[in-house]
Amino acid sequence: MKAFSKGTSILAFCAWLGAGSAGAQSVALPQNSSQNPLLGSVPTGTATAEILPLSLSDAIDRGLRQNLGLLMGSDAVLSSQGELWQERSHLLPDLAANLSENAAQVNLAAEGFGKIAHQFPGFPLIVGPFGFFDLRASASQSLVDMYALDNERSAERNLAAAKLSYADLREAVVLVIGASYLQAIAASSRVDNAQAQVQTAQALYEQAVDLKKVGVSAGIDVLRAQVELQSRQQEAIAARNDFAKQKLALARAIGLPLGQEFKLTDSAPYESSAPPGVEESLQHAYADRPDFQSAMAHVHAAEYARRAATAEHLPTLTANADYGIIGPTPAQLHGTFDASAALNIPIFIGGKAHGDAQAAQAELDRERQRLDDLRAQIEQDVRNALLDLQSASEQVSVAKSNVDLAQQTLTEGRDRFRSGVTDNLEVVQAQETVASADESYIASLYAYNLARVRLARATGSAERGIRQYWKGQ
């Protein structure tokens, strides 16, 4: 598949996936699978009435089977296998068999024997009709052909690169599914938070009504509490809608029927630990990232292609042989054979070898430049992921503390309002502070786990690392 043949579009995908800062509420994933096949899938099965429990590991397993980008990516491996067999065919023997029954009549006058007929009266100018039977096998084998040999080696390295690109595509699919699952978890948390805020607003409204009945508070307090309650109800409706859409996006990426109800069984983990060092992470990335290994395989393929181009002017040696039985009838057959060895020495082919060598050298230079660029990109990916992880970890700690402080502020405000010390404006503002603190905590926890996912992807261990991290939650 052209789009993923060398991992370039995967890098582009990772770029837009990581475009948001660690403090962003969510990563804006494209919503159209025609723009990015990693977000689409080939759904399997039919929707059932029961609610399907779905863990992150289950989602990854389904996605690796049904994700559209991965299914399309397998075509590149098949195409490279075909190209390898095409090049290998020039080194393997050609074997053929032929069975024929022939009938012929020859006009010797048309072949220039007319004068002989005048010199030798009675010389026949028409020969035949006559027939013969021929059963024959033939073989041809290239003995020395450096051009074909190096082209076969180049195709072999291209196949290895295609398989590594496919492995890199699996890592990208895991990244997409991990991010989608995290978005769904965050959306679910926002639903729970919004519902809790509605309950708090309802309690504050009822408190304002009770205090107004006993003459402790004014009517404006009731109106203010009612506006706050309805605002929280609107936010709860929007949160439920967003959660439903996030579940649809996740189902699309992993191949679930869109009508299948499912529940998320994993929560967002938080493991406050020191991130790995830059050098250690880079060593793992260069050793484990399939896209880097694929780029090196492309360089090796280009090196063999250049050697093949420079070998076009070298002699080639080919052996040919055939053996068969031939005779006028199947009952009158006799064996015949022919064997030869041909040495072909190119003398002048119009500068084709020189031109091919220049083109191959240019392609080799481009592959080396892509490899150097990817090496720098990997270092940037690793450093960005580590920075995001450190920043998000600190934000989680601060956000968690803010939630506790905001809750204390709300409690004190409610007590002051109940005692008639102040109106409920202070309470409403405190509730908004609680809602803001809860949202910041959800966003920072999402950003922290997304940073963990992106670090696993940056170091080439997304599929293995994400599963291990969630197991230890």
Image: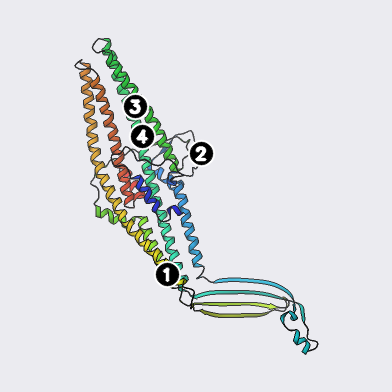
Q: Amino acid at mark 4?
A: Ala
Of mark 3 and mark 2, the one earlier in the sequence is 2
The answer to whether residue 61 of the structure is visible from this angle is yes
Image-quadrant location for residue 365: bottom left
* Cα–Cα gap, marks 3 and 4: 12 Å
Provide the secondary structure element on which disc 1 rests. Answer: helix
Query: As shown in the figure, which amino acid type bears the numbered disc 2?
Result: Thr
> Residue under circle 3?
195
User: Residue 46's mark?
Assistant: 2
Q: Amino acid at mark 1?
A: Ala
Q: Position of residue 393 (x, y in %)?
A: 25, 41
Q: Nearer the viewer, mark 2 or mark 4?
A: 4
From the image, tell me which residue sits under label 1: 357
Q: Earlier in the sequence, mark 2 or mark 4?
A: 2
Give how far apart the Cα atoms at labels 2 and 1 are.
56 Å
Q: Name the side, left or right, on which 153 lies relative to 222.
A: right
Decide: few, some or many residues near mark 3? Use Cα within 10 Å; few <14, some 14-19, many ≥20.
some
Q: Is residue 288 above or below residue 385?
A: below
Residue 287 visible at all: no
Q: Position of residue 254 (x, y in %)?
A: 44, 43
